[in-house]
Image (cartoon, rainbow, N blue to C red):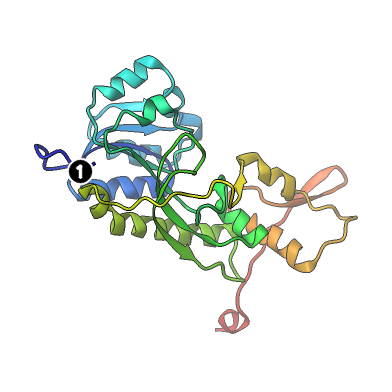
C-alpha cells in the first residue's frame, strides 16, 4: 500500500530494542518520517532503552509484553499508523496486531532467511555452517516466516567470534533498511514467499545445549573451536567446562597470523 496522499511523511509505529533498533529509529527520523508510537521491551530486558526513548519526542511508549491486551491494541489503532517497523523486537506479533497498519508490518532480521529464524542467528551460522546475512521481510503470524522484501549475505570469517559476526550483521542490517526503505515507502517493495519447510529455526534457550563442554567427550577440533568462538561475546558468559563443581568460562581470541604480527 502506498503512503496516503494527504501525508508528507510515513506515520510509523516502531518496535525495537538494542543498538540496531536505536540506529534504525534515528535514521527513520532523519528521513523525516513521523514516529507515531514506540514499543519497547519491559525494563528488565530492554537494551538501549534510554536512547530509544529519547528519540520518541513524547510520543506514546508501549510495553511490548502487553500487545495482546485489547486496551493496548485500541490505543495503537487510534494512532492511525501507516506501517509498523520491527527491529530486534523479541515478541511474536499476533494477527489482531498485524492487521492494524494498512501498509503492514515489516521486520529487520539479522539472518539470511529461511536460515536461522528465531534467536541467536550469529551463533548458529558459526555452529551449523549455515549462510549468514540480513533480511527485511513482512511479518506474518509465524516466527520470521513472512514474505521477503530484500536480503544481503554476510560472509562468516574463520576468525569470527559470535560478537564480531553480530557487529557486521548489525551494520549490514542498517544498510539494507536504508537501501530498501524508498521502495517500502512507495508501496512497491517486492514480496518473495518463503519456503516454510526449508531453513532452520532456533529458540533463545537452544544455546544452553551447546554451552557446556564435556571434558570426557571427544570432539572434532573444528566443532570445539566453533562452539568456543560462537559463544565468545562479552559480557555474555559463553561456553564453559566444569571443574570441581565450578564452571570455568572460555573465550577465544582469533587473528590471522599475518595480521597478528603486524
Along the line of sight, which residue is nearer the eye, 26 or 236? 26
Q: Is residue 53 left or right of residue 129?
A: left
Q: Residue at coordinates 20% horizontally, 43% vertically from top-left? A: 2
Q: Is residue 41 left or right of residue 190?
A: right
Q: Residue at coordinates 22% horizontally, 35% vertically from top-left? A: 57
What x and y, as percent, mark residue 22? 35, 45
Query: Looking at the rendering, which quadrant does residue 47 occupy?
Result: top left
Q: Residue at coordinates 40% horizontally, 33% vertically from top-left? A: 40
Query: Quick one: quadrant of the C terminus?
Result: bottom right
The residue lying furthest to the right in this view is 216
Q: Which residue is mark 1?
A: 2
Can the viewer see residue 222?
yes
Considering only vertical position in the picture, is 64 above or below 112? above
Considering only vertical position in the picture, is 192 above or below 77? below
Q: Residue at coordinates 50% horizontally, 53% vertically from top-left? A: 113
Query: Looking at the rendering, which quadrant does residue 126 occupy?
Result: bottom right
What x and y, as percent, mark residue 179? 29, 59
What x and y, as percent, mark residue 9? 15, 42
Amino acid at each position: 500500500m502506498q503512503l496516503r496522499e494527504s501525508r508528507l511523511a510515513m506515520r510509523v509505529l516502531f518496535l525495537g530494542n538494542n543498538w540496531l533498533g536505536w540506529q534504525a529509529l534515528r535514521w527513520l527520523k532523519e528521513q523525516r518520517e513521523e514516529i507515531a508510537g514506540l514499543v519497547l521491551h519491559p525494563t528488565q530486558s530492554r537494551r538501549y532503552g534510554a536512547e530509544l526513548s529519547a528519540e520518541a519526542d513524547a510520543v506514546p511508549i508501549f510495553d511490548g509484553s502487553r500487545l495482546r491486551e485489547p486496551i493496548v491494541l485500541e490505543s495503537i489503532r487510534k494512532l492511525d499508523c501507516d506501517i509498523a517497523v520491527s527491529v530486534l523486537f523479541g515478541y511474536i506479533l499476533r494477527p489482531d496486531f498485524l492487521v492494524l497498519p494498512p501498509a503492514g508490518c515489516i521486520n529487520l532480521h539479522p539472518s539470511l532467511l529461511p536460515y536461522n529464524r528465531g534467536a541467536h542467528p550469529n551463533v548458529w551460522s558459526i555452529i551449523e555452517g549455515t549462510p549468514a546475512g540480513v533480511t527485511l521481510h513482512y511479518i506474518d503470524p509465524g516466527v520470521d516466516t513472512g514474505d521477503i522484501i530484500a536480503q544481503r549475505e554476510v560472509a562468516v570469517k574463520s576468525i569470527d567470534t559470535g560478537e564480531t559476526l553480530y557487529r557486521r550483521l548489525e551494520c549490514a542490517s542498517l544498510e539494507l533498511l536504508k537501501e530498501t526503505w524508498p521502495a517500502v515507502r512507495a508501496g512497491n517493495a517486492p514480496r518473495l514467499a518463503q519456503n516454510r519447510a526449508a531453513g532452520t529455526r532456533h529458540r533463545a534457550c537452544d544455546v544452553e545445549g551447546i554451552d557446556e563442554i564435556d571434558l570426557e567427550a571427544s570432539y572434532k577440533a573444528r566443532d570445539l573451536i566453533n562452539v568456543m568462538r560462537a559463544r565468545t561475546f562479552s559480557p555474555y558468559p559463553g561456553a564453559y567446562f566444569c571443574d570441581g563443581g565450578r564452571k570455568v568460562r572460555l573465550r577465544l581470541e582469533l587473528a590471522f597470523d599475518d595480521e597478528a604480527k603486524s
